[in-house]
Amino acid sequence: MNRPPVHIRFGGCELTRSRHVGAFFNSPDEEYKSLMPFISEGFACGTNVYLHDGKFDQDQMVETFERLASGSTDSPYPLSRIVCQMDWATQRESDLRHLIEFEARINDVWQRHEDVVVCICDAARLSGEAVVDIIRTHPVVVLGGRAHENSFYLPPAEFLEQTGMKASPGRSLGNGRVI
């Protein structure tokens, strides 16, 4: 692979060719202080996994998450903790609508697995309508720093019907399989 190196900083230095890092900490606070800048920088670089070839493809993302999910026959991970930065979709209304539809649909995947997926949104960058729709697509929401079972959550088919976002041919609702 002859791609130019991506500059990544960790632990106060730039990682060069070797990027397999063994990190040893004396306290959770030290761990947090070391890892937080690394994670924040990753978020600041964008969420390219969502924008393959510069556009958002819901079906591709369903397939990607299905492969990453624990319990998948080809998944190398026994249990994943996935954090998704969603602010990329706030730049265009059409991306946001597609993302909200995807957020509803992806529940069919996550209900079959024990992985934890946290979707992060900057509420200040969203309209009130978008915030409400995003809340209705998540069975658990974090408000004020605490997780709550979401009484406003709607199952995918019900949410899509209520909002008029019908799944197109090739998209499944109910069993989570893309056909």
Image (cartoon, rainbow, N blue to C red):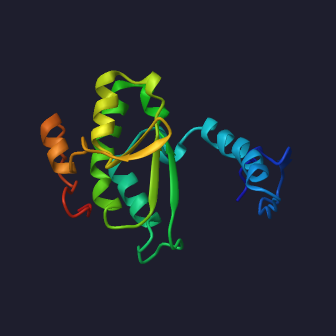
Q: Residue at x 43, y 32 (%)?
A: 89
Q: Residue at x 41, y 73 (%)?
A: 72
Position in image of residue 94 (x %, y %): 33, 29
Q: Residue furthest bottom?
A: 73
Towards the viewer: 5 or 9: 9
Q: Tell how many labels.
A: 0
164 left or right, relative to 15: left
Position in image of residue 128 (x %, y %): 32, 22
| Relative vertical location of residue 8 with respect to residue 22 in this rendering, above or below | above
Q: Residue at x 19, y 42 (%)?
A: 159
Q: Residue at x 85, y 44 (%)?
A: 12
> Within the image, what quadrant is residue 127 found in?
top left
Q: Residue furthest right?
A: 13
> Within the image, what quadrant is residue 179 found in?
bottom left
Position in image of residue 106 (x %, y %): 32, 53
Position in image of residue 65 (x %, y %): 42, 59
- Image quadrant occupied by the N terminus: bottom right
Towards the viewer: 156 or 28: 28
